[in-house]
Amino acid sequence: MKKASEPKEYVVERPKYLFVIAPHPDDEILCCSTIIKQKREEGYLVKVIYLTHGDGLSPENHQQSIAYGETRRIESLMATSKLGINRDDTIWLNFPDGQLTELDENILTSKYTGQSQTNETSLFPGKSYTETDLIQIIDTLFTWYEPSIVYLPHPRQDTHPDHRYASQLTLNVLNDKNLDPETFTYKVHGIKSWEKQFLPKADADKMELIELFKSQFHDKHHAGFLREFAWIKERLKRYKL
């Protein structure tokens, strides 16, 4: 009689996650869209974590600021979809734009939107604008996904306060959880002229993505600032925890 074969053991491989910490919509494209595309082709599942909606527009008109933030969210969703990132892989926290450094144990009210907690488009709606709640959320995301790679702003050299805060808070969570993913920093604000390595010609794919962020073309200066990223070679620097 033919002996029954032993049942096969199936091993389900855990996805390789890569986190991109983006304080505002468009940071993920400006910093490293080409590198993100390469890592996706290598099999990484990219999660983009937006700390804010980028709704810091007008303290005098809350509804206008809220609408502005929603426009920026839609622009980033269009851009990331072109990179092959699913909508479910964009994680919106919706903390107060331009005021991250003011977060502490007390509930903060956004001067731009009048809100004091995360809204319905957040993955974690109803969370208070406190540093405690934001730390808890970041901790939860690292517990859920355990990314092997993290991209975040440079905690000292990026000159935007929201960027430095987002980076340092994330690094603190990693240290507290004793996690050591491959961590790389980027700079969007404060790139020195000698740091810029210009390409022979503009990256057409990246320029197409940048052009989606029409809400950010406030004037010729800012439009030029954004478009220059299509000419600069993307640079990520390894950061040792």
Image: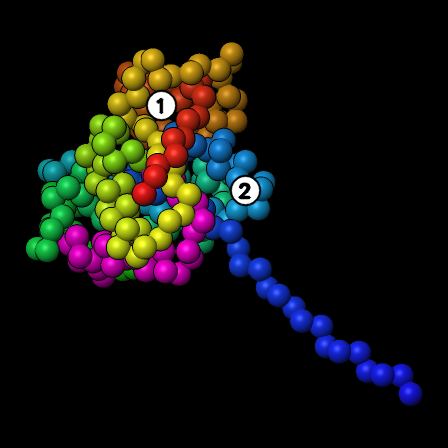
**Depth check: 63 or 21 in front?**
21
Query: Tag 1, which secondary structure?
Result: helix
**Residue 144's spot in the image, x, y percent?**
39, 61
Visible residue check, residue 42: yes
Kind of residue sitting beneath label 1? Leu
Q: Is residue 101 left or right of residue 136?
A: left
Instruction: Please tell me whether mark 1 or mark 2 is closer to you in this view.
Output: 2
Q: What are the residue bounds of the magenta stretch?
A: 126-152
Of the image marks 1 and 2, the number of the one nearer the N terminus: 2
Query: Tag 2, which secondary structure?
Result: helix
Residue at the (85%, 83%) spot, across then down: 3
Q: Which quadrant of the structure image shows residue 73?
A: top left
Residue 161 within the segment the image draws in magenta: no
**Depth check: 115 or 145 in front?**
145
Kind of residue sitting beneath label 2? Arg
What colouring method underlies this structural image? rainbow
Residue at the (11%, 51%) spot, across then down: 104
Mark 2, residue position: 40
Query: Do tag 1 and tag 2 residues touch (Cβ < 8 Å)?
Result: no
**Depth check: 46 or 8 in front?**
8
Residue 130 within the segment the image draws in magenta: yes
**Residue 151's spot in the image, x, y percent?**
38, 40
**Residue 118's spot in the image, x, y percent?**
23, 55
Mark seen at residue 226:
1
Residue at the (53%, 46%) spot, across then down: 44
Residue at the (54%, 42%) spot, across then down: 40
Q: Is residue 26 left or right of residue 96?
A: right
